[in-house]
Amino acid sequence: MISFKESFMAKIEEDPIRGCWNWIAGQVGRSGYGAFRKSRAHRVAYEMFRGPIPTGLEIDHLCRNRKCVNPWHLEAVTRLINVRRGLAPKVAGQFNRNKTHCPRGHPYDDENTRIYQGRRQCRACDREKTKQRYWERKRTKLEQDNG
Ligand SMILES: [Zn+2]
Ligand SMILES: [Zn+2]
């Protein structure tokens, strides 16, 4: 006789790199969440391994992988936090936070980075541009003087 837990665990494929327990059985509609006996599989996992989900709380995927049912990748949070976290990657994308260097290879660290109209600017590049403009002006002036 297969227990509830065993039949649940039989539908999981562990991702050796991320540690996610990917649900390989059906999903809830088109939500991307795994389905287990008419419930969301990740909620079942959470309750099975970590205990009841407090009323009013939602289960958030810390790994952002909806298929994942690893109870330690899940956290019970309020709806507001869940929505906010869902939006976070988009906001980060706008600000290009993933990039660590400017197109010319200067580091985007605290010292070298300036935020201008919501975008990051590289101070080293700024300085070079200013210098370049100065020399260009100077050269133009010299050419005019000699002209
Ligand atoms: Zn995961
Ligand atoms: Zn730069």
Image (spheres, helix red, strand yellow):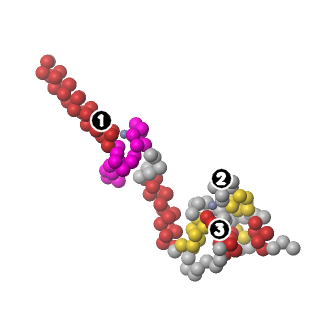
Residue 115 magenta-drawn?
A: yes
Q: Is residue 41 visible?
A: yes
Q: Where in the figure is residue 115, as x and y percent of width and height?
A: 33, 51
Q: Residues within 10 Å of mark 1 (few under 14, many from 20)?
A: few
What residue do we see at 72% from left, 70% from top? 36
Q: Where in the figure is residue 11, as x and y percent of width and height?
A: 76, 63
Mark 3 sits near ligand 1, with its Cβ under 8 Å away: no
Q: What whole-number distance in Å separates the C-alpha atoms at marks 3 and 1? A: 51 Å
Q: Secondary structure at mark 1?
A: helix
In the displayed structure image, the side of residue 32 where residue 131 appears, left or right: left
Q: What whole-number distance in Å separates the C-alpha atoms at marks 1 and 2? A: 42 Å
Is residue 133 shown above or below 92? Answer: above
Lower position in the chain sequence, tag 3 or tag 1: 3
- Residue 129 picture quarter: top left
Residue labelled with disc 2: 17
What residue do we see at 44% from left, 50% from top? 96
- Residue 3 picture quarter: bottom right
User: Which residue type does callout 1 highlight?
Assistant: Glu
Residue labelled with disc 1: 128
What residue do we see at 78% from left, 74% from top? 4
Using the image as rendered, state which of residue 31 and residue 135 is in the foreground: 135
User: Which residue type does callout 2 highlight?
Assistant: Ile
Give the magenta range: 101-122
Q: Is residue 29 visible?
A: no
Lower position in the chain sequence, tag 3 or tag 2: 2
The numbered dot on residue 117 is: none
Residue labelled with disc 3: 71
- Residue 145 picture quarter: top left
Is residue 6 shown above or below 115? Answer: below
What residue do we see at 20% from left, 30% from top? 137
Of all residues, the one furthest to the right in this rendering is 1
The number of discs equals 3
